[in-house]
Amino acid sequence: MTAIIEPRRETQVYGEYEVVVLGGGPAGMAAAVAAARNGRSTILVERYGFLGGMGTAAGVTNFCGLHANVHGEIKQVVHGVADDLLSRIDRLGGLNTPHNLFGKTVAQAYDTAAYNIAADDLMLAAGVHVLFHAWASAIVMDGERRVTTLLVETKSGRRAILGQAFIDASGDGDLCAWAGAKFDKGDGQGNMLYPSTMFRINNVDPVRAGEAWKTIPALMLKAEEEGRYKFPRKTPIIRPQKSGIEWRVNLTQLANEHGDAMDGTDAIELSEAEMLGRRQIAEVAGFLREVPGFEKSYIVDIAPQVGIRETRRIRGQYQLTESDVLDCASFDDTIGVNGWPLELHLKGDVEFRWPKIPESRGFNHLPYRMTVPQGLDNVWVAGRCASMSHEAQSAARVTGACFVMGQAAGIAAHLHLRNASVDVKDLQSRLEHEGAYLGKDVQ
């Protein structure tokens, strides 16, 4: 037997909202807050019992893309809703000072518990209705271009959420794919960015460890040459959290039996990836105990889920490209900027490709059109599943760009409901009024 026929059923309506947002990562949070602040009844649907997306569920514990190297000067270039969240995390003592990366940019670590609490407070303050532990499973449409209902599975049973405008911030483009939107996966030959499983270790001696991230690559190479370890990839990302005794570790790479990146939309591969990630973590943690300052370290936390970097990318009215990122492209319909380089997680390693720094302004505009799926009238897409090429997605999938796209999508949904269309100039004006930076002042 390969299939069954389910009986017809009546599904209880959970509620009716003007704006329905699927996915509680940075894009979904920003979208929901932006829509609610513009007076729209808004629900944010999240599969877990907390917000933050890959930043919490996958244990990233690091904001990337909030800053850019602007003609040699590091500046924060993502503002608006992002600032409201950052200030809340900071008040809870959970925000690190931005740390240098490769001498070209910075990233900003945070405590996941503080992030969770701050995100809740941000939603409550904006008047967003949040539905946790709700797994989106299907949609209902009125014709071929208009979504009317999101169906979710909950502990209370299957429920229907009715909406007038929908924002797909699911990461995997689930809602758009169910609605029939065209999408791409990988580089055109099936190769996607490899996932990782993040973990944190505790009981590190911060004085003896020092700047261990500089010495660990050579120690890894020596251990492999001696035949004692074989690492999933070459380039480690190992940095301290705010306490100094706790460090985050990103050194796994999850491949299927063919050596290709695990597919986060394939239930079987996703399950296999979870166990593979934990096996790799046990090996890496053993190696780290050989590093000075890490001798007594232990695994304090493994992320609740695999860190997925790329699955579906929905085809929008414009697809951001690799050259857009590297050439710091400008767009008339800019909704904000991306200052992160290409970060390609390839087989066995990580490859960074940068704009010309410090000669360039170090960021590209993100056009509104990349959030508008082809063929759908009342749906927007924001986050790593937005309209980008495989290479461009490796840059604009990070937190900063997700905040940008989400806030714009939330305001766009509001404008669409008011005017049956979105005037880009009006959208840009509202974004700037609400604190967003559009990057129009730097060439």
Image (tube, rainbow, N blue to C red):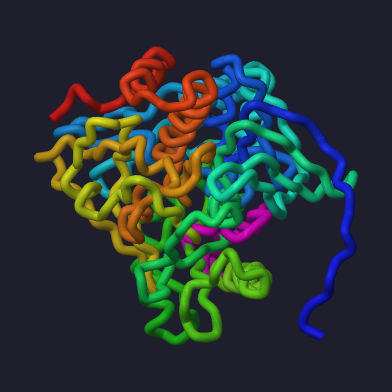
**Residue at the left extreme?**
359
For the record, the magenta segment spans: 286-311
- Name the foreground residue: 26 vs 31: 31
- Residue at (39% x, 64% y) in the render: 345
Q: Position of residue 288 (x, y in %)?
A: 52, 64
Percent of width and height locating residue 102: 27, 49
Q: Residue at x 77, y 45 (%)?
A: 133
Please identify the quarter of the rendering in which residue 342 is found: bottom left
Tell me: residue 149, above or below residue 430.
below
Q: Main secondary structure of the magenta part?
A: loop
Q: Position of residue 387 (x, y in %)?
A: 39, 50
Measured as percent of width and height from the top left, residue 167 is found at 55, 38
How many marks can you see? 0
Viewer can see residue 192: yes
State left or right for residue 1 relative to residue 43: right
Quarter the N terminus occupies: bottom right
In the image shown, does 223 or 327 lie closer to the viewer? Answer: 327
Check residue 297 for magenta coloring: yes
Q: Is residue 201 magenta?
A: no
Q: Can residue 282 be seen at all in this image of the molecule?
A: no
In the image, taking residue 121 as reference, residue 334 lies left or right, namely: left
For this view, does 188 lie left or right of residue 122? left
Residue ID at (54%, 79%): 256
Q: What residue lies at 61% left-to-right and 43% top-to-bottom?
A: 147
